[in-house]
Amino acid sequence: MNAAIAVIRRDLLLAMRRKSEVMTALFFFIIVVSLFPLGIGPEPVLLKKIAPGILWVAALLATMLGLARLFAPDHADGTLEQMALSPTPMGVLIAGKIAAHWITTGLPLVLLAPVLGIQFDLDGAALGILVVALLLGTPLLSLIGAIGAALTLGLRGGGVLLSLLVLPLYVPTLIFGAGAVEMVVSGMSAAGHLSLLAAMLALALFFAPWATTAALRIALE
Amino acid sequence: MLSATGLTCVRGERRLFSGLDLAVGAGEWLHVQGENGAGKTSLLRILAGLAPAAEGEIRWHAEPIGALAEEYRRHLLFLGHHGAVKEELTPLENLTFSARLDGASLAEAEALQALARFGLRGREDLPVRFLSAGQKRRVLLARLAVRKAQLWILDEPFTALDVKAVDMLSRLIIDHVGSGGSAILTSHQSIPLPHGRALRL
């Protein structure tokens, strides 16, 4: 556990020193979401209807941006080797890396989303559910993405393959995440969608670090 | 302590070595020699448990390393071609992180002392990317000094080091072997250390 916390702290420190990577994903999210109201024009009814989908697609693509660099630097400089040789099980360390990825890319999106949601004329209840849905959904994106990043590690053209591999797996998260907000906008309860997101998150928390570690061990051989 | 029997390594279509036996006891060290591409690095990675051998078995205190897993890794220190040193972090942060990864906690005073011993005094808080190649290797050597492992597996540890650092590393290895540890290392230079045996691939 100590070693996992050390991994998280180190990754956050690295993110602080390489701010541009974190900022790129964040600005991408802000710009994409803000371009839609500008492009579509002042039509509150239409904007309110497409808001959940746009916010979720933008969050999903913003998460994808940094995925290829999740394990690549550690692979190149031998840190991954040292993690595989650590007395702490590698799965625990990798869970730490995924947590750090979420803190640097997922969490800022969660915090920014309600501010950006105002552009789409979403009301308080919808913004609240948007935050809850993103809070459940963005860790899921990091966990699933980590499996894809590990499987394509060290491959030439891995970036394209990574998107092909991961985007279809993101579809359920997108449907239930955006669906939860749509339910509230149309006056119904979002509880069902949120429970499904939470169930998927619980499943991914259990299996994704393990699957990622298995893929990384193959990449290391 | 560490023994291997009938090791075979196959890379793609090529058989690098086969039927290799070796043993390293407490207070001994092994110098793996061979031409470029002979399979020295592959052998070390197999011994560390990073890559599987095509055939053969490796035992640590008579137990297969696959079964020991984390127990074996606790006693092992492996330094490969890439030193796992992060360019953006300072030597002190790198050293502290490696120690945590090894399951040990390292007091700052102890870390600073180890870095000073390797001529990095005054550079503890400078990101590693501002250091020279030799100084980066010295950060790794500081890790050797603070890590308490019984078995060292070092791949080309003398690369990029100046005469003084080569001396310091040699002394580290002598001390380690002298106090009952063992070491396996590759090097193209001949190493003037006692209690060593050579293995040609």
Image: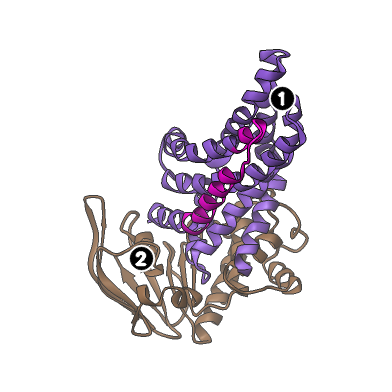
Q: How many marks?
A: 2
Chain given the colour purple: A
Classify residue B134 as left or right of residue B72.
right
* Of the pair A24 and A118, the residue shown nearer to us: A118
Magenta includes A54? no
Please state the horizontal and vertical placement of residue B119, each as a whole percent of the image.
70, 64
In this view, A107 is above or below A25: below
Magenta includes A196? yes
Residue ID at (49%, 80%): B150
- In magenta, the rendered stretch is A180-208
| Label ID, residue A120 | 1
Q: Secondary structure at mark 1?
A: helix
| Label ID, residue B29 | none
Chain given the colour brown: B
* Of the pair A4 and B142, the residue shown nearer to us: A4
Classify residue A221 as left or right of residue B194.
left
Give the residue type that dot 2 points to.
Ile
Please state the horizontal and vertical placement of residue B108, each as a whole percent of the image.
75, 70
Mark 2 highlights which residue?
B46
Q: In this orientation, does residue B30 appear?
A: yes
